[in-house]
């Protein structure tokens, strides 16, 4: 049996009558939203057969299944990154398991650096497309034809209906939600100023160390994907300050509250 099937079987055995339809992955500093989930079933990743465990400070490492904004959700509080030393194909497991337990849609969130002065810390950016700058793809290796095609189309990686509905809800809340291209850099170092300049020239608007592999795996197994970046800092060299994970977490707190409110309102708007 495949690892993701083991994970899904275990989750089903714990879920009872719960039927989560929307998966949410919470990025750095955004974990608090999971604490608002009603009637939560909380499962640490280390209890889930087949799941890797998360080590990054600021990431909790548990799945919380319950109700949020009148929807049944499965919320990953903490995610996995290639820079932790995780093999690319291991990133397939959580998303495929979430699809198998019934999640047809996934909302990904992350903390990201901005490539534009006018989209400063505290801003939110809806991802309209991505650039995979790592040369790593989580679908590398034997393809599982039962899951999806060998050559996955990514023309509309980020679902237009989800994006439109998120934009509408943001507008109704007077939230300025930027639109832009997210570039996946491998990390764990932050970028150099020269790299930040290059990424802007390449057409990126924000940079971060996650999300893209999850989008790829989720699209491959037929899930609809939307993703929102919480901008924690200007890219290296843009502000005169050096960058630290603590600073990105602190700044993330400001945007996190807004993003949490937006997610709850968007869930409420979904029928
Ligand atoms: N670069 C990469 N990842 C990030 C950044 C950044 O500036 N900020 C938050 N995550």
Image (tube, grey):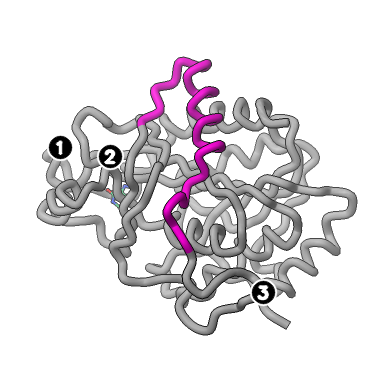
Foreground: 177 or 220?
220
- With respect to residue 111, does 124 lie above or below? above
Q: Is residue 129 left or right of residue 99?
A: left
Q: Quadrant of residue 9?
A: bottom right
> Which is nearer the N-term, disc 1 or disc 2?
2
Q: Secondary structure at mark 2?
A: strand
Ligand 1 within 8 angstroms of badge 3 C-beta: no
What's the magenta region? 153-178
Q: Which residue is mark 3?
A: 146
Q: Which residue occupies 31% across, 67% down?
A: 134
Task: Quadrant for the N terminus, please.
Answer: bottom right
Q: Secondary structure at mark 3?
A: loop
Residue 185 is situated, as x and y percent measured from the top left of the image, at 30, 60
Mark 1: few/some/many CA within 10 Å (<14, 14-19, 20+): few
Ligand 1 within 8 angstroms of badge 2 C-beta: yes
Q: Which residue occupies 22% across, 28% down?
A: 118
Q: Which residue is mark 1?
A: 239
Q: Which residue occupies 69% across, 30% down?
A: 69
> Is 173 colored magenta in this rendering?
yes
Mark number displayed over residue 233 = 2
Q: Are marks 1 and 2 in contact (CB under 8 Å)?
A: yes
């Amino acid at each position: 049996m495949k690892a993701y099937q083991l994970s899904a079987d275990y989750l089903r055995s714990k879920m009872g009558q719960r039927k989560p339809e929307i998966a949410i992955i919470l990025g750095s500093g955004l974990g608090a939203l999971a604490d608002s989930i009603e009637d939560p079933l909380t499962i640490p990743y280390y209890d889930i057969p087949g799941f890797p465990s998360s080590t990054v400070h600021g990431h909790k490492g548990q799945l919380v299944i319950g109700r949020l904004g009148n929807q049944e959700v499965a919320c990953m509080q903490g995610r996995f990154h290639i820079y932790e030393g995780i093999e690319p194909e291991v990133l397939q497991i959580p998303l495929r398991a979430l699809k198998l337990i019934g999640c047809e849609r996934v909302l990904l969130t992350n903390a990201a650096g901005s490539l534009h002065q006018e989209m400063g810390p505290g801003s939110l950016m809806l991802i309209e497309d991505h650039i995979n700058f790592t040369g790593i793809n989580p679908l590398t290796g034997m393809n599982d034809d039962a899951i999806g095609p060998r050559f996955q189309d990514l023309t509309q990686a980020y679902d237009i209906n989800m994006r439109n509905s998120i934009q509408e809800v943001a507008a109704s809340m007077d939230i300025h939600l930027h639109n832009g291209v997210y570039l996946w850099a491998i990390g764990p170092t932050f970028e150099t100023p020269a790299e930040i300049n290059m990424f802007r020239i390449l057409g990126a608007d924000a940079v971060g160390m996650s999300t893209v592999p999850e989008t790829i795996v989720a699209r491959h197994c037929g899930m609809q994907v939307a993703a929102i970046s919480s901008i924690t800092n200007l890219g290296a060299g843009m502000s005169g300050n050096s960058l630290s994970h603590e600073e990105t977490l602190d700044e993330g707190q400001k945007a996190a509250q807004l993003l949490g409110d937006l997610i709850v309102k968007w869930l409420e708007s979904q029928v």
